[in-house]
Image (spheres, helix red, strand yellow):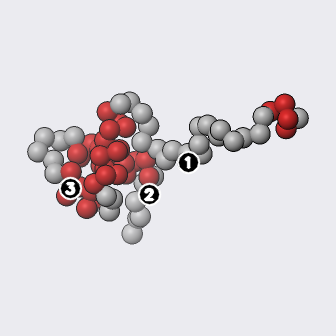
Amino acid sequence: MVWRSRSVVDERLEFCRLAGLEGANVSALCQRFGISRQTGYVWLQRLRAGEPVEDRSRRPHVSPRRTAVDLED
C-alpha cells in the first residue's frame, strides 16, 4: 500500500480549490480538513490577496523595547 505524501501547503491549496467551487460548503470542508472555520477563511483570504498560504513567522515585526544597535555594538 502506498501512502500519500502531501505537504501542508498542498493540503491548504486543495482546501482553497474545493472552497472555490460553486456551491461549496466552507463549514463542511473545514470539518473534513480538521480545521476551524476561522482558519479556513484566513487561508481563503490570503489566497485571494495573492499571499502564500504557508505558515507565517510569529516573530514580531517591531520590538519597541529592543536595545539600540549602537549600544549592542
Is residue 17 toward the left or the right of residue 11 in the image? left
| Residue sitting at the far front | 65
Q: Earlier in the sequence, mark 3 or mark 1?
A: 3
Residue 41's x, y, as percent?
29, 46
Q: Earlier in the sequence, mark 2 or mark 1?
A: 2
Which residue has dot 1 on it? 58
Residue at image position (61%, 37%) is: 62
| Amino acid found under the numbered disc labelled 3 | Ser
Please tell me whether mark 1 sits on a helix, a strand or a loop. Answer: loop
| Image quarter (top left, top right, bottom left or bottom right) of the N terminus | bottom left
The circle drawn on residue 5 is 2
| Amino acid found under the numbered disc labelled 2 | Ser
Question: Considering depth in this image, is 39 or 23 the residue closer to the camera?
Answer: 39
Residue 70: which quarter of the image? Answer: top right
Question: Considering depth in this image, is 4 or 15 the residue closer to the camera?
Answer: 15
Task: Say above or below: 6 vs 41.
Answer: below
Graded by Cα atoms within 10 Å as few (under 14), some (14 to 19) or many (20 or more), the crowding at tag 3 reads some
